[in-house]
Image: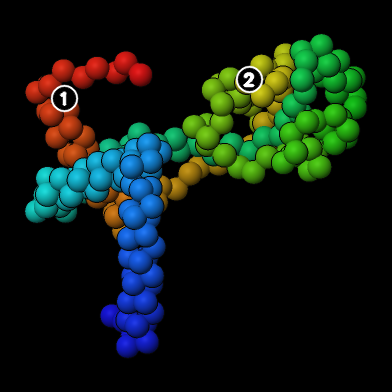
Amino acid sequence: ELTDEQKGQVLDELISTQLIANQAIKDGLDKDSDTASRLAVARMRLLADSESQKVLKGKEPTEQELRVEYEAAITGMDKTEYHARHILVATEALAKDLLAKIKAGAKFEDIAKQNSTDPGSASKGGELPPFTADRMVKPFSDAVKKLKKGEMTAEPVQSEFGWHIIQLLGTGEVKPPEYEQVKQQLARGILQKRLQAHVDELKKTIKIDKTL
């Protein structure tokens, strides 16, 4: 619902856009290769969106389907939250040297502040916000899962970011989100699956050449 003033603003904008578009055609810009390609992509996306709406019309998930999807989601979610700190450095040799210093009595947080290259945690003595395993890179999460409270990794752990010295400070239980909180997200997920199933069926009807 727009006010008369807002309707006037929209109309003025449409008029200006149409005038500029008309001039672009007179200048032959619609024949420009880059512009033509962008127009073709925009047309393709608009048609695909229209087809998607047609396919999904009247196929909104039922309450029962949403409940089943919810139960499957919370059953599969990681219910353990980890509280840890780490020191990140570029080389294994440096990581081993720092680990030896900590084992010899140096404070973990002091070593982290002086040496860690992780900008988000170094100033906090290496302490990370609580996290679930799926939010961390696999080598890191695998190492954390094996630790007991207060334990530190016996050897540095390598990930795509460098070498980590990790200490587990504690664990907690993650409470699943309430059904009503994620209901719309679940509905979008189910609709996306139905659309993907339609796309998969379309793929069976033609030969697709992925050569670029």
Give how far across and how far down residue 10 sits, in percent: 35, 75
Q: Which residue is mark 1?
A: 203
Q: What residue is at 32 percent from the left and 50 percent from the top? A: 185
Q: Check disc 2 and give the amino acid type.
A: Ser
* Disc 2 residue crowd, few under 14, some 14–19, many 20+, Cα 10 Å: few
Give the structural element (helix, strand or loop) at label 2: strand
Q: Quadrant of residue 162?
A: top right
Q: Mark 1 near mark 2, Cβ–Cβ under 8 Å?
A: no
Residue 64 placement, left or right of 17:
left
Q: What residue is at 32 percent from the left and 88 percent from the top? A: 4
Q: What residue is at 38 percent from the left and 52 percent from the top? A: 27
* Disc 1 residue crowd, few under 14, some 14–19, many 20+, Cα 10 Å: few
Q: What residue is at 9 percent from the left and 23 percent from the top? A: 205
Give how far across and how far down residue 86 sits, in percent: 72, 30
Q: Closer to the camera, 137 or 154?
A: 137
Q: How many marks?
A: 2
- Tell me which label, 1 or 2, sits earlier in the chain: 2
Q: Which residue is mark 2?
A: 159
Position of the C terminus, as image quadrant, is top left
Q: Quadrant of residue 136?
A: top right
Q: Check disc 1 and give the amino acid type.
A: Lys
Q: Quadrant of residue 113?
A: top right
Give how far across and how far down residue 91 sits, in percent: 78, 15
